[in-house]
Image (cartoon, rainbow, N blue to C red):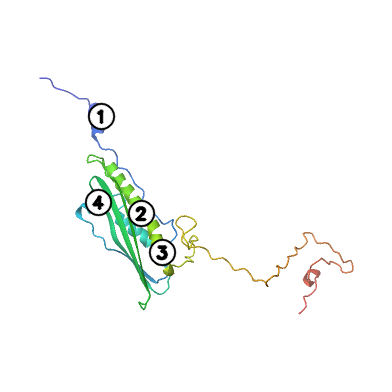
Amino acid sequence: MKHWQFSPLAVLALAACSSPPPLQTFAPLDYSYLPPLVLKVANLSVVNNYVPTPSQATLIGEDPASPITTLQNMLNRRIVASGAPGTATIAIQTASIDQVNGNLTGTMTVDVSVASPDGRSTGYAEATVSASQTAPDSDASQNDTQAALYGLTKKLMDDMNVQLQYQLQHNLSSWISWSGTPGTAPLAAGGAGAPGAIQATPLTPLTPTAPGTAPAPQTPAPANPVNTNPAVPNYLPGAGPAALGQAAPQ
């Protein structure tokens, strides 16, 4: 009977071949660079009404960027209150990821409800997005599975930021503070301009002139004024009494 002997180096090589690759790291999904959506309310709350099924909860737990947590963080930071009287409630109705027939499918739904203090004026908007992609094989590595879930969540969040802004502008335009908040980027009321912008900096009104009257021309001061009146020492064109060392008239 033969007895096989392995050198320590061979054993280490076999162990290295059988060990799984190191886990990949994923950057947090952060949308703080986008301008805020400012609502004319004093009290604003974000609530989560979504309860995942057991299979959905398993996938959400494997996702490096949980869709529920990522969506809630974005809403808390991006939708802000202006301080005007009123209340707003932003509710997460769905933030699901599921596997159906070999595909990963995801859906996000957010409701926004606003009301004046007396309840006479109210408003409502809903933003819904969905996306799907082929699910990893059953024997896929943990890195591949996490990368697929992370990519789907990022797609959902990118679409939600666009859809949420559109629905607020379309359905709650009168509740949006178009002047923005100090220190934020200018936003375009019509949705034009840089991606993610919703408000525009107000123009400074010009001083009106009489109809048919051209603005009075401005006469520039001489760059190097010269004394043109020898009878008055130190005289300079356009200079007042102070320039001649005299007291100004009272």
Name which of mark 1 and mark 3 comes first in the sequence.
1
Between circles 1 and 3, the one closer to the viewer is 3
Query: Residue sitting at 25 percent across and 29 percent down?
Result: 13
Name which of mark 1 and mark 4 comes first in the sequence.
1
Q: Residue furthest top?
A: 1
Residue 157's disc is 2
Residue matched to label 4: 98
Query: Residue sitting at 43 percent across and 61 percent down?
Result: 36
Give the position of the N terminus as an image quadrant.
top left
Between circles 2 and 3, the one closer to the viewer is 3
Residues at circles 2 and 4 in contact by the CB criterion of under 8 Å: no
Residue matched to label 3: 170
Between circles 3 and 4, the one closer to the viewer is 3
In the displayed structure, does residue 31 sit left or right of residue 6? right
Secondary structure at numbered mark 4: strand
Instruction: Return the x and y of residue 49 as percentages of the image width and height.
Output: 27, 63
C-alpha gap between disc 2 and disc 3: 20 Å
Q: Residue furthest left?
A: 1
Secondary structure at numbered mark 3: helix
Name which of mark 3 and mark 4 comes first in the sequence.
4
Residues at circles 1 and 3 in contact by the CB criterion of under 8 Å: no
Residue matched to label 1: 13
Residue 94's disc is none
Image: 57 above or below 234: above
C-alpha gap between disc 3 and disc 4: 30 Å
Packing grade of label 1 (10 A; few <14, some 14-19, many >=20) is few
Give the position of the C terminus as an image quadrant.
bottom right
Q: Residue furthest bottom?
A: 250
C-alpha gap between disc 2 and disc 4: 16 Å
Secondary structure at numbered mark 2: helix
